[in-house]
Amino acid sequence: MSRPPYHPGMSTLEPPDHPLNLFAGIDTGAAEERFDTLMSRPGLRIERIVSTGQSSPPGFWYDQPQDEWVLVVAGSAAVLLEGEPEPRSLKAGDHLLIPAHRRHRVEWTAPDQPTIWLAVHVTEDVAPHSPSSRGA
């Protein structure tokens, strides 16, 4: 799976000089899922994933070294976490935290419309938010 840039000329380290749209550049007939890094920092990666009916190959399980929080922005999908009897169905607005090394797979994504995911990958390098760390 290739990971083309989200927006030509966009740097994940510097803010763009204009707003970008999460729904821009979606190919509704793509044969493969598309993964676009929206932002990347040490300990943090935010991706837009666009699925057009894809699922994990038979017998394949993701096993990632970082926590992953996913939000279905549009469309629908089902994610199976290893050890659970049934996949979790997700529709627009639903989100799920998948802990590091929790094996999981995508059982299906909507075949009739793009499923747009926002995926946030976090390692232990990212400090938790503390209200006292904000300026007054």
Image: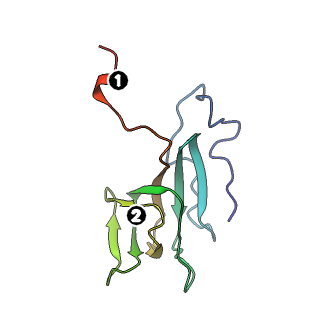
Q: Can see residue 111?
A: no
Q: Residues within 10 Å of mark 1 (few under 14, many from 20)?
A: few
Spot occupied by residue 136 in the image (x, y as percentages of width and height) = 29, 13
Rendered view: 99 above or below 118: below
Q: Residues within 10 Å of mark 2 (few under 14, many from 20)?
A: many
Residue at horizontal 29 percent and vertical 23 percent from the top = 132
Spot occupied by residue 104 in the image (x, y as percentages of width and height) = 46, 73
Determine the CA span between mark 2 and mark 1.
37 Å
Rendered view: 7 above or below 112: above
The label shown at residue 88 is none
In contact (CB < 8 Å): disc 2 and disc 1: no
Residue denoted by label 1? 133
Q: Can see residue 85?
A: yes
Residue at horizontal 54 percent and vertical 74 percent from the top = 54
Spot occupied by residue 122 in the image (x, y as percentages of width and height) = 48, 49
Amino acid type assigned to the residue bearing label 1 in the image: Ser
The label shown at residue 75 is 2
Amino acid type assigned to the residue bearing label 2 in the image: Gly
Relative placement, left or right, of 8 versus 80 is: right
Tell me which colouring the rendered structure shows.
Answer: rainbow
Q: Considering the numbered disc 2 on the image, is that residue within a helix, a strand or a loop?
A: loop
